[in-house]
Amino acid sequence: MNRDTRSRRQVLGVLGSTVAAGLSGCGFTDGSDQGESLETETVDTPAKPTDSATPKSEVTTSTSYEACMEPVGCLTFDEPPGRWVANDGIYCDMGVALGLADRLGGIGSPRRYYTGYYEELPGVTLDKTSYPALSRGTRMPKEPFYAVDADIHLIDPVWLTNTFGWTETDVEEIATNVGPFFGNYIREQHDAWHTYQYYSLSEVFGKVAGLFSRRSRYEKWKAIQSELTDDIQSRLPDDRVELLLLRPQGIPPRSFFPQYIGDSVSDLQWQVVEVDDALEGSGIPEWGTRIDYETIARLDPEVIVMETQFADDFVLEESFREFVLGHMREHPVARNLTAVENDRVHAGGINYQGPLISLFQTEQAARIAYPDEFGEEELFDRERVARMVTEGG
């Protein structure tokens, strides 16, 4: 694997200024997910010249290709990376979807990676406890990176510097001594430091598939995802449901982080089902605030959905009805909410979702938003998805 000095300068430039203006000349696409910059090139290289003509048998063939993504720029590879690591469920799920679980070397934050959906995919399994965690609570030390010794880190290095206090020297040290970084933090779109391009889940998945030379799996997933989206949207009723998305705090929850539905990866399923966001026009701040039941009562949405960012959260457990609904039905304010009275308070899912997780959560969103149309219907073929992962077909 070869990483040229041009790419190293680009990474350091972005880390230093947190802008990606200097990356425009390194093969980036116009934002589409076609992955033009991820193709493999075969170059005929003549052997060392002699006094006579070079025989055809002495012409060697070298194969190299580039993988490009903001903010890291373009990386050059002679062959696909082997061992890889990722921080959370977005990129970990991409690796599993590409059939690369056997090469996973470590997980940055296992709590932000939910693997329960894999139980519905025959032959697809991943035991998170068998992999080392790179993070140490609120710290992300460099030592675990050396211990794992990965060929590629599917982590946004600018995110590392702004979340864990890494310096550009730290990033360059690991990129040089262990393996390069290749990632873009796409979960949300509100961080002031993220001044470079955001990508859709499909765009990033296409780039990661190109990195590992597994574009065929990506194309198959894209077909499944497109069919699921088209099927759902062709059946949506004319009247959209009003939905309030919350992140509960405490057990039982007594306050909530309101979650506006936007264009980020964490909200992909709600974009597909085209719900009306109950927070729009409410005047409630988009970030850094909590709301109580009295505020929810003023909004009084048709449907309330509670999501999480942790795989071991009660929102993803069967006890959700006991911890949340039981409490709300007895609460003097919450029990009078329209959603509570109509039994339309639901557990949503985890907002770190990669390509496989998003299929399940999009199906779930359709069932939650429009039960009269979708009920408990399976909206995509589990066997087909499993074959894509395990066999590439």
Image (tube, rainbow, N blue to C red):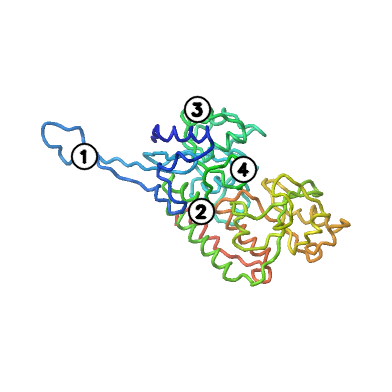
Q: In this view, does 168 lie above or below 39?
A: above
Q: Residues within 10 Å of mark 3 (few under 14, many from 20)?
A: some
Q: Whole-Å distance between the Cαs marked 3 and 1?
A: 37 Å
The residue sitting at 68% across, 68% down in the picture is 371
Sequence order check, earlier mark of 2 and 3: 3
The residue sitting at 51% across, 53% down in the picture is 202
Instruction: Find residue 236 and report its horizontal and vertical position in percent.
Output: 62, 70
Left or right of 101 on screen, residue 114: right
What residue would you read off at disc 1? 59
Dots 2, 3 in contact, CB < 8 A: no
Residue type at numbered disc 4:
Asp
Mark nearer the viewer, 3 or 1: 3
Mark nearer the viewer, 1 or 4: 4
What residue would you read off at disc 3? 173
Left or right of 76 on screen, residue 144: right
The quadrant in which residue 370 appears is bottom right
Instruction: Find residue 139 and report its horizontal and vertical position in percent.
Output: 64, 32
Q: What element carries label 1?
A: loop
What residue would you read off at disc 2? 202
Residue type at numbered disc 3:
Glu
Q: Whole-Å distance between the Cαs marked 4 and 3?
A: 25 Å
Residue type at numbered disc 1:
Val
What residue would you read off at disc 4? 191
Q: How crowded is mark 4: few (under 14 residues within 10 Å), some or many (20 or more)?
A: few
